[in-house]
Amino acid sequence: MTITPYLKKRNTSDNYGIINLRITKNRKSEYHSLKINLKEKFWNDNRKEVRKNDEVDYITINEKINDEIEKLKKQQKIDEPELLGKKNVSFIQYFRNYLDELTSLKKLGTYKKYNTTLQHLTEFIKKDGKTDLKFSDVDYLLIENFDKYLQKLHLKSNTRNGY
């Protein structure tokens, strides 16, 4: 997740803009307005902050931008548990949770493809007598063996690569 401050103007000819934050997560952007009007000449687009000047209180505005960024980052950490840092977390359960998220976002085409992948993966680990797969179990050898399993099912190369 990245949070980038920027000055949003209604028209390119406008002299004023509103400071916003662009929150990008999983290649999707959301926008959060700080409701601060600012002349374009006071905004440093390279450093993403208000320039030093005598006309506006640049220190207070820059602090507000940084405080809002920190607040959004803390909120994100609460909303999203750190699953990847824990090796004993179930990869299968993580996959199912992701499928639920796809359903709620109404991404049905992606859901169908990933659901089929999950079905093949669970059948693959069942042949070894396992019912679950941990993140620590996922490595290059597992992926190679999964690919060989898919070959035995007579799936074409592009289909296997998609799974």
Image (cartoon, rainbow, N blue to C red):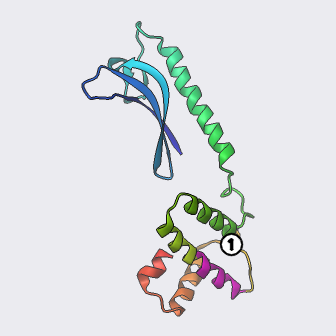
Residue drawn at x 32%, y 29% is: 10
Residue 107 pos. (x, y %):
50, 63
Residue 31 pos. (x, y %):
47, 37
Magenta span: 118-128
Residue 34 is a magenta residue: no
Residue 94 in which image quadrant: bottom right
Residue drawn at x 65%, y 80% is: 122
Q: Relative to 35, is 81 above or below?
A: below
Residue 105 pos. (x, y %):
53, 57
Residue drawn at x 65%, y 37% is: 74
Residue 125 is a magenta residue: yes
Q: Amino acid at mark 1?
A: Asp
Task: Name the residue at the top extreme.
Answer: 54
Position of residue 155 in the picture relative to residue 79 (left or right): left
**Foreground pick, 7 / 127:** 7
The secondary structure making up most of the magenta span is: helix
The residue that mark 1 highlights is: 137
Residue drawn at x 65%, y 58% is: 84
